[in-house]
Amino acid sequence: MKTLIRLLPGLIGLAMIACGTTSSRADDTPPGVTVYVAGVVRDSNGETPTLWRNGLAQSLPSVGRAGRALSVFVDQGDVYVAGEVGEVPILWTNGAAHVLPFEGWGGEARSVFVDAGNVYVVGYDGLGPVLWINGEAQPLLFPGSGLAYAYSVFVDSGTVYIVGGVVITQYWNMRPVLWINGEAQALASADTDGEAYSVFVEAGDVYVAGAMMVDSRESPLLWKNGEIQPLQGSFGLAYSVFVDRGEVYVAGELDYAPVLWTNGEAQALPFRNWEGEAHSIVVFQGDVYVVGADEENPMIWINGAGRPLAFRGDEASAFSVFVSRD
């Protein structure tokens, strides 16, 4: 594997520079918890990977190159953020940037998960989907000879679950796929068109959120153990799934508006502009946290009440949320 450290001169040195703080603490954050949000801020200089902590925006090291923070996970006080800088897959650990090895033109790190001290990251490079375990790359095998992408990882009792999409070349469309310990399982027939964006495992049941084309329209979908579960609405995407005490929560969008589904029932999330999306959801101590975008503004909704995340720039988006105790 190529490491691309030589393609990002100064990254290791800059990784330890303190991040810049740009906003105020979120006064509606419940006491005793810390809310982490990964995303991107855009301005005339390009894209800056950004981590919000209780509403305080911090720019992650990127050596002046465009980049995005796409996923955040906290374990034992250590903060892990997956993303990309200059189309290079990156893992930030407590603000220090680490280049993940890859092949081909470049890649992205799309999701991070920590279990039993091991750090799992999934994404893709120029050759296809990749799982990195503690920085070591393991290419994921997939059906067909086209392209494939991995978007989300979840680890339960040592079993690694990954979801994404595979390009079926004879149809020129995407097929949603679930990998279990590296073995690919198609979630739909080869002539369908769709992708799987998020995976969550609870009590042995595997939940996957995504979308497929139905009657020439993108429709949000939830799979449970490979079987499609209905989500209210017919034009949109399901980006994130979380299960808590038997309740199944899905975040996404319907008709270009941010939506939270609870056990399949859609609830519109408030937003101010023409369109919006809900990208990620977490339930912590009974409170429901959703992040996304209200057109050009990053948003956080807590139990349905929304507010923008402050930032310095022209526009921004929030892609991932994680909540932990202080």
Image (cartoon, helix red, strand yellow):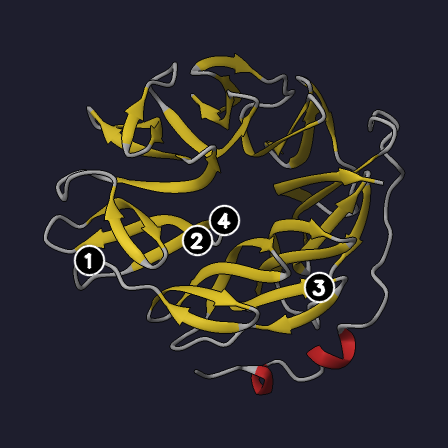
Q: Are marks 1 and 4 in contact (CB under 8 Å)?
A: no
Separation of residues labelled 4 and 3 (CA atoms):
24 Å
Judging by the rendered image, the residue that carries numbered circle 4 is 157
User: Does 298 appear above or below 99?
Assistant: above
Residue at disc 3, secondary structure:
strand
Percent across and percent down for residue 175 are 24, 45
Q: Earlier in the sequence, mark 4 or mark 3?
A: 3
In the rendered structure, which amino acid carries the disc numbered 4? Ser
Judging by the rendered image, the residue that carries numbered circle 3 is 93
Give the residue displayed 76% in from the left and 45% down from the top.
52
Separation of residues labelled 2 and 1 (CA atoms):
18 Å
Give the residue displayed 41% in from the left and 70% down from the top.
138
> For the residues carrying marks 4 and 3, which lies nearer the camera in this image?
4
> For the residues carrying marks 3 and 2, which lies nearer the camera in this image?
2
Judging by the rendered image, the residue that carries numbered circle 2 is 160
Residue at disc 4, secondary structure:
loop
